[in-house]
C-alpha cells in the first residue's frame, strides 16, 4: 500500500512544491486519497472526540445537579434547555458523549484483542479447534444479540462494567471470523515459508509475521464496529438495561425525553439524539473511507 | 453407490444446522437459567421458605442443570414452552398473538428496505465513482447511522404530536376499528381479504411509521452488498462480451449483471433477518407494537423466564433456518457451488 502511495508524494529532492502546498491539501490527498466524505467524517469525529475529552471544561452546568427550573426551553442560559429534574441538557449531552465513547471504545478494543487472537489461531492451526470455534461463532451469530446483551447485563447486574463486558462478548465472533479468513489466506504465502525456513518458532510466525498483516482488515472492522457499538450501548440504555440514571447517557436521555414529548419538551431528546447520530455517522464515514483505502479490492475502483 | 454431489452438500449443510440448533437450545436454556430471579418467588411473593422449597421441588428446580435441560428439551419437543407470569397465559398462547404482529412489521420493513436499498446499490455500482455513487453512499451511511429509537421518537413527535398526519402510535389498529377475522394474522391482508378496505387502510396507517423505521435498518446492508456484488459482476467477461455484441445497457445491467450479483445478495438475507428481528425489539417498544420483540424486552426486564428463553430460541432458530435455506438455495442456483462438492 505504501508502495502505491509513494509516487503521489514528490521526492525529497524537490522540497519546494510540497512545502508550498498547504498542510490540509497534503493531508487531504496524501492520507485520504481525495475522499471528501472520509475527510469530512474524520473532522467531525475529531471534533466530537475533542468535545468528549475536554468535556468537563465545556460544561456550563453540573450535569447531575437538579434544580427547580424544570423543562425550560433552550435559552442563552441553557443552550439545549433543561430536563424534568431541571438539569442542563447541554452539559449532560457532553458528559454522555464522553461516557459513551469510553464504554464503546473499551468494548470494541476488548473484542478486537480476543476475537483477533482466536481468529488467528483458528486460521493458522486449523483442525478440530478451528471447527469447534467456528461452529460456536455460527451459533452465537444466529442469536438476537441485543436480547442476549440485555439478559447478560441483567445477569451481571446493570452497570458500566457489564455493558463493556457484553460489548466485548457480542463482538468477538465478527473479529474471529474475519481474521480467521485473513490468516487462512495468508498462511500459505511465501514469506511465511521463508520465516519458517529461517527457524522462526510457530508463535513467532503467528504474532510477528502473520498478525501485522491482518491489521488493516482489523482497523476497518473496528471503526465500523465502533459505530455500531455506540449505537448499541445507547439502544441498551434506551431499553432500560444500559447505563443507569442519573449517570448521563445519550440513550437514557432520549428515553427520558420521550416521556415529556407530550408536554412539548422536544429539546430533551432531539439534542442528545442528534449528537448520537452525528457520532455514529462520523465513525461510519471514517470506517467506509478506511475500507476504501485499505481494501485492495476496492482500491482499483 | 455414488452419492450425488448436491446431496452431499445438502446433508453436510443440514448436519451443521443441527449442531447450530442444538447449541441454540443450550444457550436459550442457560439464558433463562441464569436470569437473576427465582420463578417461585416472582410468582408467589409472600410464601414461607418451606413452601418455597416445596414449590421448587415440584417444579423440578432443585434438580441439576443437565436434568433440567433434558426436561426443557422434552417440553420444547412437546410444544410446551411454559407459562408467562407476566401475562398469566402460556407462552404458546402469547406467541400466537404476537408472532403475526412482528411478521407484519418485518415483512413490510424488509420489503421497504429492499425496494430502496436494491436500486441504491445498483445505481452506486453502475455510476461508480461519480456523484450518483457519492450521494447514494452518503444516504446509505446516514440510514445506517440514525439510531432507530431516536428516529422513531422524533417522527412520532413531529408527525403525530405536531402535524397530526399519522394516527397515535398505540399498536396495530386504532381502537375505533375491530380486528379483521384472522386468516394470515396480518391485519392489512386479512382486512383486504374480508373486503374491509377501511380497516385495511387504518391498519396500514398504523404500520407505516414503524415499518419505515425498521426498514431503514435494512436499506444500508442491502445497498452495500448490492453495490459490491454488482460492481464485481459488471466486470465479468460475459458483460464485456454482451457490450461487444451491442446489447442494450438496460438489458445487460438489469438482466445479466443483476442475475450474476443475486447470489451474494441472497446470502445476506439471513443476516438481514437477524438484524430486523433485533431491530423489532426497539421499534416495537417505541411504537407500542404488540409483537415478539416488545414481548421479549418486557420479559427480560421483568425476569420472566419462560418467554425469554422461548423468544430467544424462536428468533435464533428462525435465523439459523433462514441461513440454511439461503445456503441450500444458492447451491441450486449456482452450479459452481454444487460442483465444489462433486470431488
Image: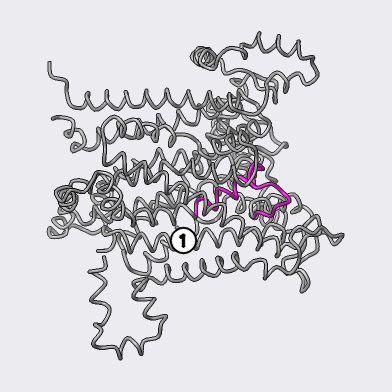
Quarter-of-image position of residue A142: top left
* Residue A199 drawn above or below residue A50: above
Bounds of the magenta segment? A227-249
Query: In which chain is the residue bearing label 1?
Result: B
Side of B124 relative to B149 (left or right): left
- Residue sticking out furthest to the right: A68
* Residue B91 as seen in the image, left or right of residue A19: right
Which quadrant of the figure contains the N terminus of chain A?
bottom left
Within 10 Å of the Cα at label 1, are there few (<14), some (14-19), or many (20+) other Cα atoms?
some
Q: Which residue does the image show at 24% across and 43% down from the upper left? A: A202
A122 is within the stretch colored magenta: no
Viewer can see residue B257? yes
Q: Measured from the top left, where is residue A14 in percent x and y?
A: 25, 88
Question: Which residue does the numbered mark 1 point to in the structure image?
Answer: B139
Q: Residue at x 18, y 38 (%)?
A: B336
Q: Position of residue B341 (x, y in %)?
A: 18, 30
Residue that appears at 59% across and 20% down: B92
Amino acid at each position: 500500500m505504501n508502495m502505491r502511495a509513494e509516487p503521489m508524494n514528490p521526492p525529497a529532492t524537490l522540497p519546494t512544491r510540497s512545502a508550498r502546498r498547504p498542510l490540509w491539501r497534503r493531508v487531504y490527498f496524501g492520507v485520504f486519497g481525495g475522499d471528501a466524505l472520509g475527510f469530512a467524517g474524520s473532522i467531525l469525529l475529531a471534533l466530537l472526540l475533542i468535545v468528549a475529552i475536554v468535556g468537563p471544561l465545556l460544561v456550563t452546568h453540573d450535569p447531575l445537579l437538579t434544580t427547580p427550573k424544570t423543562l425550560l426551553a433552550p435559552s442563552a442560559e441553557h443552550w439545549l434547555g433543561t430536563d424534568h429534574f431541571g438539569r442542563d441538557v447541554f452539559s449532560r449531552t457532553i458528559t454522555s458523549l464522553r461516557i459513551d465513547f469510553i464504554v464503546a471504545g473499551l468494548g470494541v478494543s476488548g473484542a478486537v484483542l480476543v476475537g483477533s487472537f482466536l481468529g488467528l489461531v483458528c486460521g493458522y492451526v486449523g483442525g478440530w479447534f478451528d471447527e469447534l470455534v467456528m461452529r460456536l461463532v455460527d451459533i452465537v451469530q444466529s442469536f438476537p444479540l441485543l436480547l442476549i446483551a440485555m439478559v447478560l447485563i441483567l445477569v451481571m447486574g446493570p452497570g458500566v462494567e457489564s455493558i463493556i463486558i457484553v460489548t466485548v462478548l457480542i463482538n468477538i465472533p465478527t473479529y474471529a471470523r474475519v481474521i480467521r479468513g485473513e490468516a487462512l489466506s495468508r498462511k500459505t504465502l511465501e514469506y511465511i515459508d521463508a520465516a519458517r525456513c529461517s527457524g522462526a518458532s510457530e508463535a513467532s510466525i503467528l504474532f510477528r509475521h502473520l498478525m501485522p498483516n491482518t491489521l488493516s482488515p482489523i482497523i476497518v472492522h473496528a471503526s465500523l464496529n465502533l459505530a455500531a457499538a455506540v449505537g448499541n450501548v445507547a439502544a441498551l440504555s434506551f431499553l432500560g438495561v444500559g447505563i443507569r440514571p442519573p449517570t448521563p447517557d445519550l440513550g437514557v436521555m432520549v428515553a427520558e425525553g420521550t416521556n415529556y414529548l407530550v408536554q412539548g419538551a422536544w429539546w430533551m431528546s432531539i439534542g442528545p439524539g442528534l449528537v448520537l447520530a452525528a457520532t455514529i455517522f462520523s465513525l461510519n464515514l471514517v470506517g467506509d473511507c478506511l475500507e476504501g483505502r485499505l481494501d485492495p479490492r476496492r482500491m482499483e475502483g | 453407490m455414488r452419492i450425488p454431489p448436491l446431496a452431499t452438500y445438502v446433508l453436510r449443510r443440514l448436519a451443521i444446522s443441527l449442531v447450530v440448533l442444538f447449541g441454540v437450545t443450550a444457550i436459550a436454556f442457560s439464558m433463562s437459567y441464569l436470569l437473576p430471579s427465582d420463578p417461585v418467588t416472582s410468582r408467589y411473593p409472600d410464601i414461607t421458605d418451606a413452601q418455597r422449597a416445596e414449590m421448587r421441588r415440584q417444579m423440578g428446580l432443585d434438580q441439576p442443570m443437565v436434568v433440567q435441560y433434558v426436561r426443557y428439551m422434552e417440553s420444547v419437543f412437546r410444544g410446551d414452552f411454559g407459562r408467562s407470569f407476566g401475562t398469566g397465559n402460556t407462552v404458546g398462547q402469547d406467541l400466537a398473538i404476537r408472532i403475526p404482529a412482528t411478521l407484519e412489521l418485518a415483512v413490510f420493513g424488509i420489503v421497504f428496505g429492499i425496494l430502496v436499498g436494491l436500486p441504491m446499490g445498483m445505481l452506486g455500482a453502475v455510476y461508480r465513482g461519480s456523484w450518483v455513487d457519492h450521494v447514494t453512499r452518503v444516504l446509505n451511511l446516514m440510514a445506517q447511522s440514525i439510531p432507530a429509537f431516536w428516529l422513531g421518537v422524533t417522527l412520532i413527535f413531529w408527525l403525530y404530536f405536531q402535524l397530526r398526519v399519522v394516527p397515535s402510535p398505540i399498536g396495530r389498529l386504532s381502537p375505533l376499528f375491530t380486528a379483521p377475522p384472522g386468516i394470515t394474522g396480518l391485519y392489512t391482508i386479512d382486512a383486504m381479504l374480508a373486503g374491509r378496505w377501511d380497516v385495511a387502510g387504518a391498519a396500514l396507517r398504523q404500520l407505516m411509521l414503524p415499518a419505515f423505521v425498521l426498514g431503514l435498518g435494512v436499506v444500508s446492508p442491502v445497498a452495500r452488498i448490492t453495490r459490491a456484488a454488482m460492481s464485481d459482476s459488471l466486470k465479468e467477461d460475459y458483460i464485456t462480451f454482451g457490450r461487444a455484441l451491442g446489447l442494450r445497457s438496460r438489458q445487460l445491467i438489469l438482466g445479466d449483471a443483476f442475475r450474476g450479483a443475486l447470489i451474494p445478495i441472497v446470502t445476506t438475507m439471513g443476516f438481514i433477518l437477524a438484524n430486523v428481528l433485533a431491530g423489532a425489539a426497539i421499534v416495537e417498544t417505541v411504537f407500542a407494537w404488540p409483537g415478539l420483540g416488545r414481548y421479549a424486552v418486557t420479559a427480560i426486564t421483568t425476569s420472566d423466564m419462560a418467554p425469554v428463553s422461548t423468544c430467544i430460541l424462536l428468533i435464533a432458530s428462525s435465523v439459523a433456518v433462514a441461513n440454511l435455506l439461503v445456503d441450500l438455495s444458492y447451491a441450486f442456483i449456482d452450479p459452481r457451488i454444487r460442483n465444489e462438492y462433486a470431488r
